Image: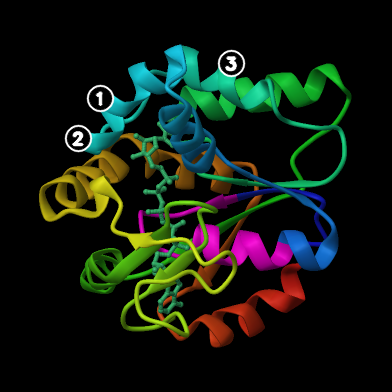
Amino acid sequence: MASNRMVFLGPPGAGKGTHAAWLAEDRGLQHISTGDMLRVAVKAGTEIGLAAKVYMDQGKLIPDDIMIDVLFADISDTGWILDGFPRTVAQAEALDKRLAEYAAELDGVVLFEVDRQTLIDRLMARMTCEACGAVYNRLHRKPLVEGVCDVCGGKLQQRVDDRPEAVTERLAVYDKQTRPLVEFYDRTSRLTRIDARGAIEDVRLAMEPLLP
Ligand code: AP5
């Protein structure tokens, strides 16, 4: 599967953002994280950001109509990795429809598979730079100086939705609303599964044969 238009699919904490970041930089692809886009909107206090915050803090999904508008305002014609979109069948159908309008199609979907306890452990230990959004982990990917971003010197903090109540809700929302996408993409032979339980470098090596 040599791909320029990819979707990274998987539960919260599976490593979608971690692997999308290096791959996009390495291959000159656009990394489109709907979670990051929404966090920027929340920080800027835009109308969408204010509406989204209520859902995000509780670990719920933003309504499809809002989300589809947010995504398609930013997507380019060149290669990209979608990280966190689609998350419902309605979003996946909207993406296929949009690509068909440009006589294009999705090259592949990578499903990151990780057991539940590992997801919870990773999310509880995640730290994010409040200035540039770089992602760290207290257990697996420590910054050089505790609490300080290696990239920009910003302060590291825990995401509001990485608190235990929100993590429980996000995992339940994934099972109910996003997991059906596995069958949706499997049906059309677009899905590749990755065992993403191992160390970041091992998962990266396992991904190499799939990549453009
Ligand atoms: P979003 O930001 O997309 O969150 P998510 O999908 O829940 O994914 P995460 O960012 O939690 O996990 P990830 O898989 O990217 O893991 P990461 O690489 O960071 O969405 C947030 C919210 O926005 C949603 O809840 C919703 O409200 C809203 N939203 C966004 N998109 C939406 C949409 N399309 N529709 C509706 N609502 C939407 O890794 C996690 C941690 O583990 C890090 O600390 C990392 O360093 C570490 N780690 C990663 N891989 C490994 C490894 N192999 N070994 C050890 N540690 C690892």
* Location of residue 32 in the rendering, given as x and y in whole percent from the top left corner: 64, 43
* Between discs 2 and 3, the one toward the N terminus: 2
Instruction: Relative to 117, say whether 96 is above or below.
Output: above
Identify the amino acid type marked 3.
Asp
**Callout 2: CB less than 8 Å from ligand 1:** yes
Q: What residue is pinned by disc 2?
A: 58
Identify the amino acid type marked 2.
Gln
Q: Is residue 158 magenta?
A: no
User: Residue at left 46%, top 74%?
Assistant: 196
Disc 1, disc 2: CB below 8 Å?
yes
At mark 3, the secondary structure is: helix
Q: What residue is pinned by disc 3?
A: 69
Disc 2, disc 3: CB below 8 Å?
no
Q: Which residues are magenta?
A: 8-23
Q: What residue is pinned by disc 1?
A: 54
* Between discs 1 and 3, the one toward the N terminus: 1
